[in-house]
Amino acid sequence: MKISNKDFPFLFAFTFIISIHKISNAVDTIATSQILRDGETIVSSDGTFELGFFSLGNSKNRYVGMWYKKITVMTVVWVANREVPLTNRSGLLKVVKPGLLVLQNDTNGVIIWSSNTSRPVKTPVAKLLYSGNLVVKETNDDDPENFLWESFNYPTDTTLAGMKLGWNFRTGHEVYVSSWKSNDDPSKGDFTYHFDPTGYPQHVVKKRSVVQFKTGPWNGLGYSGMPNSRKNSIYNYGVVLNKNEAYFSFELLNRSIISKVTLTASGVAQRSTWINRTQGWVIYVTAPTDNCDFYGLCGAYGSCNIAKTPVCGCFDKFLPKDPDGWSNGDWSNGCVRRTPLNCQNGDIFLKYSGIKLPDTQYSWFNESMTIKECKVKCLKNCSCTAYTYLDISRGRSGCLLWFKDLINIKELSEKGEDMYIRMASSELDLEGKKRKVLEVGLSLSIGMVLLGLSLMLYLRRRKIRNHRLRTGRRLEDKFIDRKNDASQNEDIELPLFDLYTIIKATDNFSINNKLGEGGFGPVYKGQEIAVKRLSRNSLQGLDEFKNEVICIAKLQHRNLVKLRGCCIQREEKMLIYEFLPNGSLDFILFDPMRCAVLDWPKRFHIINGIARGLLYLHQDSCLRIIHRDLKASNILLDSDMNPKISDFGMARSFGGNETGANTSRVVGTYGYMSPKYAIDGMFSVKSDVFSFGVLVLEIVSSKRNRGFSHRDHHHSLLGNVSYLSEVLRSVHVGLLCIQQCPEHRPSMSSVVFMLENEVELPQAKQPGFFIERDLFAVESSRGSINQITITQMEAR
């Protein structure tokens, strides 16, 4: 078609009209002369964020929202019309005077969603900032104090760097996030996440109006109940608290890092970071992290410890308020002081350490007080129940007081804090009297016990020697002979350590040298050694102690922990191991921050090492040994992340062609036990294979087999896509190991071969779920349903 000169003015006018209705992808601003239609977007100046229309899943509903432009996975961080979606592509977004951002249905002119404004301006624009904050402002006014409206004040389920989560006291406006209903429905779900400045600041997750989780108070470095969220290399954060506002915010240390905090549809707050190498999100921190994080689970003055069974307990010098309910698993009534307070006659404060500080809803604070002044302040007020430091970032300064009962306390394995709880002054007198009684009683008892032991050992030694003449020397006898006859120790070369040497090496079992504690007792760090000390309160005893010595003393393999000796002196029974600086596997594997060091090559190396260690126990050692308690906490890691199987207190040894046995008492850890063993007491080398399979799946996924979990967790399992074949092979081998029938499970020699070679693997059959019987009846009679070692031992 030929265009004449007289047509040019009309063509120019038509082109201009079209131009004011379209938005280029290169701009970050919408002016009053422009319209953003479905299919068009604006992009922040640095190219990080993009805003436009989108749909979710298979739904045809259309939303206006914001997402990351630079990453391959569509990740929406803000939605405008979350409650009122468009049902077609007729939507348009525009800015109108006096300063409103409006989403309109172009078909019928109905306004779907709109921002608000407190004052009019002449030339309003909407601009998408590089921070991900969509603002409405005067064209040339970039002062944040003058913004008419900003999306950071109305988030959906995501908190971004620079966003202020909290309260503006001048306007009465609260900024909080709320979950989506589902991954395909961004409308407001059941859960909300708040910064609560009541009393002293803490974060709160609610399900509708019911509190589900509280972080504990801010301590200057982080939140008391979230030790993993403290200083790191990705972001820093802080709390602002003054008469005008109270809020929490974080800033990224490197703007090239993509990191966000999202409240999932199931009520879990997740900090996740985008990893370009794997092209996926990695969960960095989650809250809540386990069952002990559920608000008020153990009631007033009850403390929760996920490593114990039951998880709830009472502090020292406290008793269950409802003993019957407590024994039945109803901890809601909590605990009470065994000696009631008597404020008029004088109270004292006792120190409790290593805990998540309780709910601060009813608290008072002063930033300038010393801890001594804090104590005096609390002591003068009979309603004050406890006190502690306010800020640990400045050398433990300030004062934090609690009023009313203490609730929401959790025992932390590390980085827990101290608090001083008000107690009756008679508690100190009781402790002094008990100590004197114990000292006198112990002196008499020890003398009688030593006399009795000497007679028993003499008779036992004579009986053993007579038995040895008839049947030959058994391995168990070597342990007893080692203690009683130093001249006959050629078969079991296990050094005996002097108690004084161990006390000196561990600084008299200093709490600072304590590495952890299990069913046997506490473990302490010495000089290149780890000392496992039998606790007097332990349910385990001489049988387990002897069993561990017998099973491991002569075993030598790079993937088994090395027993360097033992100490049997006075009432002490201690095992001396090599010291492994990286601790237990579960300490790293199930921690959202620490597990980042376990890239896929390390995980695969650990899986292979455990497999080789088990193969040695089952096939290549002098005796066939079934471990019976293989789990992540019993795998120790040396400085090079080499795995070493530990804790042989529950192992069984066999000679000849024996490969298993039957027992009336089950020992081990539920979640790692094969069904036949847990239910019928039948164990074999294939029981260990089952436990290994569970462990493989945990190593791949960083998730516990039993315990707290969420359907919205999307952990990165691969670490690096180039290792996909190894990951899939490991998972396949793990599934083969946890098959229901023991005869279907591979031997450890087959497992090692399958892991180390690219071979075709057989199809895995039905996994070993506990489906045949009433599991609760079984567990109530045989042990814990949590991740705790069961210490009932059968006779040998």
Image: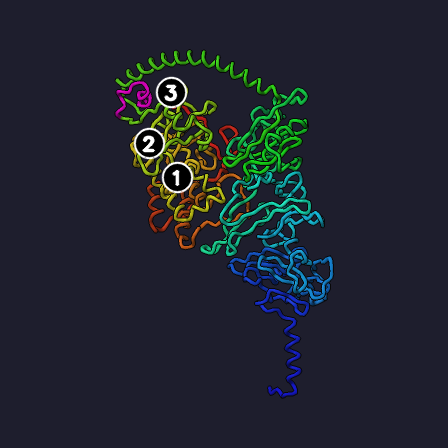
What is the crowding at mark 1: few (fewer than 14 residues within 10 Å), some, or many (at least 20)?
many
User: Residue beneath label 3, please?
Assistant: 569
State yes or no: residue 484 in magenta: yes
Query: Of the residues tagged 3 and 2, which is closer to the observer?
Result: 3
Name the residue nearer the viewer: 23 or 368: 368
Residue type, numbered disc 2? Glu
Query: Residue 329 at x, y = what percent?
Result: 58, 30
Query: Residue 696 at x, y = what percent?
Result: 42, 43
Label 3 sits on a secondary structure element that is strand
Name the residue nearer the viewer: 244 or 360: 244
Q: Quick one: label 3 or label 2, which is nearer the N terminus? A: 3
Name the residue nearer the viewer: 738 or 347: 347
Over which residues does the magenta segment extend?
A: 476-490
Quarter of the image for residue 676 reads: top left
Q: Is 533 positioned to the left or the right of 425 in the image? A: left
Quadrant, the N terminus: bottom right
Identity of the residue drawn at 63% across and 53% down = 155
State yes or no: residue 730 in magenta: no
